Image (cartoon, rainbow, N blue to C red):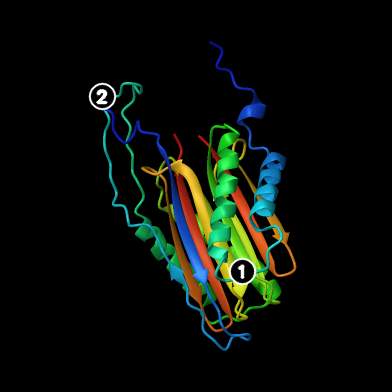
Amino acid sequence: MSDLLKDKSQRREKRTVKVPSEGSHGARGKEATVRTKDSISIVSSMDELGHHDDNARMVVTMENTYQMDILKDVLTNYLQQEKYEVEWSQKMTKTICEVIRARVKDLMIPRYKIVVLVHIGQQCGQSMQMSSRCLWDAANDTFASYSFKNSSLFGVATVYAVYFE
Amino acid sequence: MDEYQTEEETAFIVEDVSKVIKESVEVAIGGSTYQHSRVNQWSTSVVEQCLSQLSKMGKPFKYIVTCIIMQKNGAGLQTASACFWDNSTDGSCAVRWENKSMYCIVSVFGLAI
């Protein structure tokens, strides 16, 4: 019978981070609302009745709350006590990106391609909106994101994991 | 049946994608001034436009499109991305657009199936 593995329906997922502000100079705190997908538990299934595939396939969908722990950990450690400075934050954004990529790779989940995005911005009372949409296979692909803020800066990290067939 | 696909049809072409992004942004927020109440709708429409144009290109790719719309306030923003993928088939494209009142940064990642 056909199952998730065969079904290549493409659905869109949306994540929005809204950071509203009402003051002109950082006197007001920002509120970040992060809506993440419901967590998906790890599912492994053997397909031995493949109509199109001759090989049995193990599909492991990623536990995205586990990824979020990595993001939370890295962002908090690197940004906790820091103040926004242009050059420092340029370097830090790249460093954090690479650290997160390395840690997600360490999870050694086979057949997944990873995209990591990190944004670090200054808290100036400005308003901004971040959103994303994906055209992928919702059964196998997923994402996780985490946002961090302190009095002078905010940091947002997102990881997308895409199954490679 | 010849199912051979030329490299052009299966490669991630940065120029084409960049054009698509610029058009989508122009159409969605072209002459507008930053308004907090409308920004949600704008960013949704930028991303949806991009995604629908990209899927019309008919290439065997999965796409991730992200959009940041930020009010111009003198604040700084840094963005970086790191990817673990196949360099020969996958690619990304980022476009930075601005007008008098806001910045819009759109990134598209294309991962070959």
Q: How packed is label 2: few (under 14 Cα within 10 Å), some, or many (20 or more)? A: few
**CB atoms of marks 2 and 1 within 8 Å:** no
- Labels 2 and 1 positioned on one and the same chain: yes
Q: Is residue A164 shown above or below B70?
A: above
Q: Quadrant of residue A90?
A: bottom right
Q: Which residue is mark 2?
A: A49
Callout 2: SS: loop
Question: In the rendered structure, which disc, 2 or 1, sits on the residue that comes first in sequence?
Answer: 2
Judge left or right: residue A148 versus residue A23: left
Callout 1: SS: helix
Judge left or right: residue B54 versus residue A141: right
- Label 2 marks a residue whose chain is A
- Label 1 marks a residue whose chain is A
Q: Which residue is mark 1?
A: A92
Judge left or right: residue B23 versus residue B108: right
Q: Position of residue B66 (x, y in %)?
A: 56, 55
Q: Is residue A77 shown above or below B13?
A: below
Can residue A164 be seen here?
Answer: yes
Label placed on residue B47: none
